[in-house]
Amino acid sequence: MTGSSYDASGDRSIAAQHIGHAHTGDVIGLPAEILTAARDVPAPPRLTNLAPLPLCLGRDDALGDVRAALTRDRGMAITQASTVHGLGGIGKTTVALAYAHRYRHAYSLVWWINADSPARIEQSLAGLAVKLFPAWAGNANQDQRTAWATTWLQWHPGWLLVFDNVENPADLNPYLGALDGGHHLITSRRAIGWPRTIHTLSLGILHPDEAANLICAHAITGRTPTPHDLQAAHILAAELGHLPLALEQAGAYLAQNPTIGIDTYRRRLPAKLDKAADGLYIERTIAHIWTQTLQSLTVRNPLAVQVLRTLAWLAPDNIPISLLESPDSDSDALAEALGLLAAYSMATLAPGTISVHRLLQTVLRATAPTQPGRPLAGQHEAEHALTRALRVLPEPTTGPAPEWDTLIPHLIALATTTPPKHHNGSIATLYVTAAQYLYRQGHDARSIPLREATVALYEEHLGNTHPFTLASRNNLGNAYRVAGDFDRAVPLLEATVAQSEEHLGDSHPDTLISRNNLAVAYRAVGDFDRAVPLLEATVAQSEEHLGDSHPDTLISRNNLAVAYQEAGDFDRAITLLEAAVAQREQVLGDTHPATLTSRNNLGNAYQASGDFDRAIPLYRATLAQSEQVLGDTHPDTLASRNNLATAYRAAGDFDRAIPLLEATLAQSEQVLGDSHPDTLISRNNLANTYRVVGDFDRAVPLLEATVAQREHVLGDTHPNTLLSRNNLASAYQAGGDFDRAIPLYRASLAQFEQVLGGTHPSTLASRNNLAGAYQEVGDFDRAITLLEATVAQCEQVLGDTHPNTLISRNNLATAYRVAGDFDRAITLLEATVAQCEQVLGDTHPNTLTVRANLTYVRDAERRASR
């Protein structure tokens, strides 16, 4: 039998609710008839949501490269994809749009996706579901529409998906792998970080001749450009750095003002800019031409300037035109202003929406005029537009709210870009409402910009210790923790607890909540010495001041039980969790999210103690309820699914464990992000399961990646980082690579002993694994000494029949046998077989392994005695 290794079970036992009510953290379960519709609904002929074909000069080579990359046979690649990357304003979106138009007849469907965040990707895919299956999608929530569209794309090959403006390559992981029946075309400023299966095309500035032709194509109509026109265009193009966005906007200005020649326009521009090839230069270039456009727009249509400055503070894509409308506005005047902005290439119009280039927004905000004591130009209008739109909507207290889903990206953009020390009480209230809505949907990490803006506003206008300020700071700390940003979460929560104790009192309910959340943050970073005493004190105070069955008391008690379990104290953990489940069922109800959390954590404790007969049925029931109550992709549902899969694996049911872990990892990457701590837990567990079944080609690279990510996200000595290192060493050992396995085992064991102590279950597992590696390389003296100590400690700490105790006994018996001590090997194996049959069952893989070892030792003894 090989050495044991550990998995993180991924309980999510706390997240902020209100000031800090803690609960744990969803995959969309679609009815069978809806999934069948995804298979049977055909695409309308040449369905597309493309914007109009742009003028795209000088990019024929780039278009040819994209086509070649997308049609090339890429061997083992799951998808064929091309990424067009470059600086803002370089023309990435124009090239992608030109490609999509040129080759649209080669595809069954072409769908444009705004991809600057996971939320925007989901919105775009949800829109595809509405186009394909409106009868159902009109009444479905966004998560359900997204899941249906993804399923449809899996059934129907031959499509093109264009992911525009990808900020983080990891945002595409759920799609590049799962959707392999068509082409993915990506635009991004990111030049690195793409999978090796993705061809990358670095897009540069235009050739001087093509740049001059682009200006002339806009500015000169009805005749052929003269040599003088071309010479003037060459000079202007050089002045603008041959940057496509600047050239297009300069050409659009000239087209709108035909009496102004190219030479005159160039002379009116400000002084020449330094030609540094960086983002700052490009921003200055856009500002360079903006001065002239602003003057012209101000004269022709002042409303257009006002609208453009308002758009600068919102998200760049798909801004609802209704946001710009008010009861006293003139719809005809607004339509004229928007049309003029489109004519000047300052914005892109689509039915019902308008979009603005991100770089132009940056310039508009940087050059926005202001008056003392007043917001920057356009900022107040943006705030007023969002307040007007959101205030008439029902507050999203339960379930999905599609109208809020549409407007929250614009609210986040406003929160992110608002200068410090600007206060608007109405918008602050909307920030809080939107943040709490995201939290309830399991997306607390996405609420961070809203919570940061709220904290800044409250600190500035209510003071550093006002109860609202403390509440918002507590919620921000929890959002940081959920996002895995412990370096910001812990100090912020520590400061909040200290201030709450001083200004609200030691036993104030909000102080207790903040203290509970700080303790959970300590637990998340593996600091049990601070987590357990703080939780014990918080539980005692909650019982005294709030009552034994108050929801906040139950939260703290649940979290204390989880801390006991993670610190290796299973008896106290199980007793406390069983009581917590019973109380939550009585107080909150059988399907309340907090009740499901306690059940999930109780299943973890059962599994950790080796009681699979109670763990697996409890996991199954909890997962079914989570899917029904929270949704299929809620973080708590993902955690339950992960835990059930690891229990299957621990019980030897790999046929159910591996598919469930693969699906959970893909969903975690999509919902939580590639480097979220819970995603890392799922990745570790899947990789370790590959190792157990002998699939080292998949196990080792996945474990190496997980170790690197955990070192970066959690730190070098976090228990989960050490866990992944131990599992990686086990994979090296199983593959026969002892030169890498043994040093990694030694380092991991030393760190386990230092961080968790000499008798923590993770330390014992690491010690057992190192001994097994010594044995395999023939160092029996060190192996036996280490294993004897490990068995004794396992019996004392975990109990005589714990699965890890049985593994250590089997390994010690094997070491005795290899060293020629058959009597001790047989005696130990006979006892271990009996215990395995009793605890794990007669056909469990570990039972079969120990029984086979006993047979082998008996045969070896008979051969030796002849």
Image: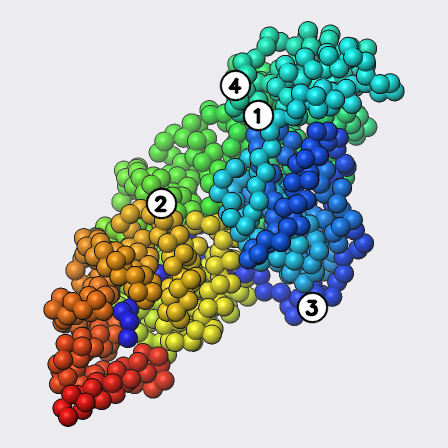
Farthest residue in the bottom direction? 866
Image quadrant in which you'd find residue 151: bottom right
Tell me the quadrant of the picture where the C terminus can be found.
bottom left
Say which residue appears at 53% left-offset and 29% top-offset.
Answer: 417
Element type at marker 4? loop
Earlier residue among tags 4 and 2: 4
Left or right side of 80 for 834: left
Q: Which residue is mark 3?
A: 36
Q: Circle 4 sits on which residue?
A: 276
Could you tell whether 419 is left or right of 777 in the image? right
Q: What kind of residue is marked 4? A: Ala
Q: Which residue is mark 2?
A: 712
Badge 2, how many Cα within 10 Å: few under 14, some, many 20+?
Answer: few
* Residue 365, horizontal then vertical, whole percent: 57, 23
List the residue tagged with mark 1: 362
Q: Earlier in the sequence, mark 3 or mark 4?
A: 3
